[in-house]
Amino acid sequence: MYDFKIAAADDATMYRDLASALEGLIAGEPDAIANMANIAALLWESLPDLNWAGFYRNVSGELIVGPFQGKAACIRIPFGKGVCGAAAATRETQLVEDVHAFPGHIACDGRSRSEIVVPVVDKEGRLIAVFDVDSETPAAFDAVDAEWLERILQDTFAD
Ligand code: SME
């Protein structure tokens, strides 16, 4: 088992440490599901205030729950539905401060209040998954989280 101690000094420092821990953890490993599992575990352990962190994989044009940490979740999400479906359909990060104000939000866990969902694209430019982090705190995530999560996912799956 790996024991990375990522101190949450400030967001930029925390994400820098996280990115370098992940670089070591994932280096040379081509299996996407293994890498998704380790990313979900490390982010779950490192980011404050989460109640879910994980992947929905693109399986033949439908999102199916993949490696995650947190409570058991909805299994299948159509493209275009909810926050995850919107990220998959638009291939754009969805930063949602208040999930109740998001049309079609899927309440897997009724206590979730805010979330961020980042599309995950491989080297060939194919959408392989979306990465979803949820919190019970309203507006728990901001543009810094979006930027770093995009960078980490791109470095892992597209570079
Ligand atoms: N929040 C997502 C559903 C997935 S779960 O929260 C784990 C959505 O509305 O897309």
Image (cartoon, rainbow, N blue to C red):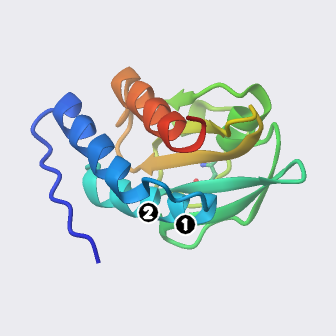
User: Residue 41 lies in what quarter of the image?
Assistant: bottom left
Residue that protrudes farthest toward the bottom in the picture? 1
* Number of the label disc, if any, that sits on residue 34: 1
Give the camera-side residue of 110 and 69.
69
Q: Secondary structure at mark 2?
A: helix
Q: Residue at x 65, y 25 (%)?
A: 92
Q: Position of residue 124 (x, y in %)?
A: 75, 35
Q: Is residue 92 above or below residue 137?
A: above
Q: Dot 2, crowdedness within 10 Å: few (<14), some or many (≥20)?
A: some
Q: Is residue 159 above or below residue 57?
A: above
Q: Residue placed farthest to the top in the image? A: 143
C-alpha gap between disc 2 and disc 1: 6 Å
The amino acid pointed to by label 1 is Ala
- Residue 131 is situated, as x and y percent measured from the top left of the image, at 57, 46
Q: How far across and how far down the image is residue 69, in percent?
A: 46, 66
Q: Is residue 136 left or right of residue 100?
A: left
Q: Quadrant of the N terminus?
A: bottom left
Q: Residue at x 29, y 49 (%)?
A: 47
Location of residue 112 in the rendering, given as x and y in whole percent from the top left corner:
47, 51
Element class at badge 1: helix
CB of mark 2 near ligand 1 (< 8 Å): no
Asked if residue 49 can be seen in this view, the reply is: no
Farthest front residue?
28
Is mark 2 in CB contact (under 8 Å) with mark 1?
yes
Q: Quadrant of residue 73?
A: bottom right
Type of residue at label 2? Answer: Asn
Circle 2 sits on which residue? 38
* Viewer-side residue, 92 vs 109: 92
